[in-house]
Image: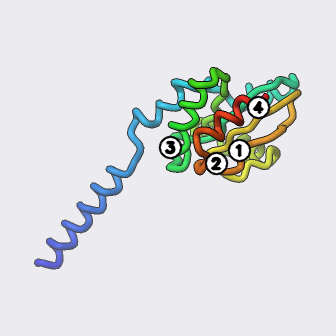
Amino acid sequence: MIKKFVSCICLLLCLVIFYACQPSQEAKSEVITSTQSISLEEVEEKIRSREDFYLYVGRPTCPYCQKFFPNLEKAIQDTQVPVYYLNTDEESSDPVKSFVSSQNIQTVPHLTFYQNGEKQTYLEKGSQTPLEEIEQFLKQY
């Protein structure tokens, strides 16, 4: 009887810890405020139109993206450079997988600059990139 009780307590504790570690809705919607949401179709159109633009690829459920985003948000505010946000959680997986593969995106978060519709450069450190380097990257073009 005691073993069942201890097992139930452990299970309950694990569930509480699991749900406490989930990102809140507030954290999930945070990305939308300083970036401009864009669909995969719109990204592909910008590339076909040979536009210059910054693209942030990430997802609100990614812990590395959650770590990276506050610095990105501050850099966007400081530089006033528009950055488009492709939320990979909201896009169907096959087209996203194809796009990610074609653009050689290995991990998220991923911040890229496209010039004349071609990928020019990206932040290599991902979530480890300090604010100053993100700002420098955004001011580069």
Question: Secondary structure under badge 1?
Answer: loop
Disc 3 versus disc 2: distance between alpha carbons?
11 Å
Picture quadrant where residue 137 is located: top right
Q: Which residue is mark 4?
A: 140
Quadrant in the picture for the N terminus? bottom left
**Amino acid type, label 3:** Gln
Which residue lies at the image location 24% right of the left edge and 61% below the top edge?
12
Disc 3 versus disc 4: distance between alpha carbons?
24 Å
Say which of marks 4 and 2 sits in front: 4
Is residue 5 toward the left or the right of residue 73 in the image? Answer: left
Could you say where residue 79 lies in the image, as x and y percent from the top left? 63, 24
**Amino acid type, label 2:** Gly
Q: Which residue is mark 3?
A: 66
Which residue lies at the image location 84% right of the left edge and 38% below the top edge?
120
Question: Secondary structure under badge 4?
Answer: loop
Is residue 107 toward the left or the right of residue 74 in the image? Answer: right
Picture quadrant where residue 41 is located: top right
Q: Which residue is mark 1?
A: 123
Disc 4 versus disc 1: distance between alpha carbons?
12 Å
Quadrant in the picture for the C terminus? top right
